[in-house]
Image (spheres, rainbow, N blue to C red):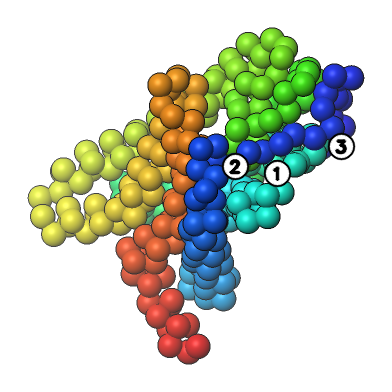
Amino acid sequence: MAGFNFTPSGPSAFILMGIPGLEDAHLWIAVTFSVFYFIALLGNFTILFIVRKEQTLHKPMYLLLCMLALTDVGMSTSITPKALCIFLFNLKAITAVGCFTQMFFLHTVIITHSAVLGTMAFDRYVAICNPLRYTTVLTNARIAKLGLLGLVRAVLFVLPMPLLLSRQPFCANHIIPHTYCEHIAVAKISCGDTTFNRMYGLMVAFVVSGLDLTIIALSYGLILRAVLRISSKKSHLKALNTCTAHICVILMSYVSCLFSFLTQRFGESIPLQVHITVANLYLLVPCMLNPIIYGVKTKELRVKMGIYTCRR
């Protein structure tokens, strides 16, 4: 990331304002963010620790769960430390390189997270619709390759965003009304023509979300068709129960993400503090709840967690 080619008019630093209009509540917001962040780290690192320790959990499903946990940690860590510095210590300055670096890593992790959710949907499809071929179709090595492919896709899509913005002039306005360097939030303060930047960001969002949501929709459409062909109601519930946790995670992730994305670009009538609060919560709340959902809904993982908790 050291190779950014800044224009002469490019700033040496930006100012992140936190949540404008809620300055008096910054302390309480910081406490809330700290609690969410701590729970997210504790839950996700617990899953990573248990799956690593237990040989019986070295399966594709749990490897995907570890990937999800890593992206959750990456998303929350990309924004929370700087946000807490703003809320608690009023440390609002961030270097231009630091801002564009944060933008790159944050959006890379978000797109990788989306790829993991798509792969998890395909995993559930194979497990329910082709259970006899599951071990041959989805091996640990193949899951690792799919995860790497998702990461490479994210890097290739995201890298042009900070590179293009770093070449834009920012004139006298270096103030970003946000807690982190979100792509559109930074583009809005440029005094140059950012039409291409905005269109590229919109294209990436719809291509990535469209592809991953299509995979998810097709997978669950085929799962539903297969389940409806089963005559036993008990088998219906058993098959659908294996998908409950993943469906909850998908709804939390995509609904909050798409709401934040669309309001940032088209919701001019929505107050700025609502934009920013939602943009932060969609990166923190799912990261906090995902390990709880999987811990509760996945029996094998729940049992192992109980064993380790009792040992401690």
Residue count near mark 2 (Cα–Cα under 10 Å), binned few <14, some 14–19, many ≥20: many
Q: Residue at x 44, y 61 (%)?
A: 291
Q: Residue at x 86, y 37 (%)?
A: 2
* Amino acid beneath label 3: Ala
Q: Residue at x 43, y 77 (%)?
A: 304
Q: Position of residue 109 (x, y in %)?
A: 60, 43
| Tag 3 secondary structure | loop
* Amino acid beneath label 2: Gly
Q: Earlier in the sequence, mark 2 or mark 1?
A: 2
> Where is mark 3, residue-wise?
2
> Where is mark 1, residue-wise?
92
Distance CA(mark 2)–CA(mark 1): 8 Å
Distance CA(mark 3)–CA(mark 1): 22 Å
Does residue 266 lie above or below 120 as drawn? Answer: above
* 71 and 79: which is toward the camera: 79
Q: Are marks 2 and 1 in contact (CB under 8 Å)?
A: yes
